[in-house]
Image: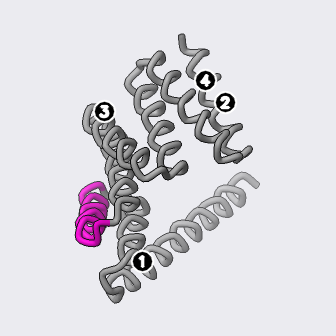
Amino acid sequence: MNKKILILIFILVSQLVHAQQKEIDSVMRLYHTATVDTLKIQYAYYLGRAITEPTAAARYIEEGERLAEKLQNRYYISFGKLCRAAIYNEQGNYPLSIKNNLEALKIALEIGNAYLVMGAYDDLGNTYDDEKDEQKAIYYTKQSIVWIRKMKDTSLLVDGYTHLSNYYDKL
């Protein structure tokens, strides 16, 4: 009985991995045929977040940032910095993650995009938590919650308070 369950789990996991790879391959085809516009930037950032190999992921994010700069699209410049910050955080390079998040936050505040502002604050909270600085994690998560309230997104609000509770528990 246990062998059958393990085989079933293996088959399901294999199917999920295969499906994700097919999706990545499809987006790559779209990316390579897209013209230089915001759609191509979106494809680049998607691939940068979906590909697990850090060097390849960083290459797509860099390309998205280059295209966003070329189009002078501040939304996607900020979003690219958030994507880059996430990669640095996954690599344990917290100073560069924080630097990119703060740069993204500055642009997001300047353009008034609540989603990007909230995302930058939330990512800063997560990064400081990973860095074991719970006081700063709490501060930035509280800032994120302020913006979530402005957005009136109850599902994100639950996540924000869950993170906040976890950070307080670590004090």
> Between tags 2 and 3, which lies in front?
2
Residue 3: horizontal and vertical position, in percent? 68, 56
Q: Which of the two discs, 3 and 1, labels the residue nearer the N terminus?
A: 1
Percent x, y of residue 155: 71, 46
- For the N terminus, the quadrant is bottom right
Q: What stretch is highlighted in magenta?
A: 54-72
Q: Residue at x 35, y 86 (%)?
A: 34
Query: Label for residue 94?
Result: 3
Instruction: Identify residue for label 2.
Output: 161
Q: Earlier in the sequence, mark 2 or mark 3?
A: 3
Task: Give amino acid for label 4.
Answer: Asn
Structural distance between the alpha carbons of marks 2 and 4: 9 Å
Q: Residue 39 carries which label?
A: 1
**Residue depicted at 43% across the width and 44% down the height:** 109
- Mark nearer the N terminus (4 vs 1): 1
Label 4 or label 3, whichever comes before in sequence order: 3
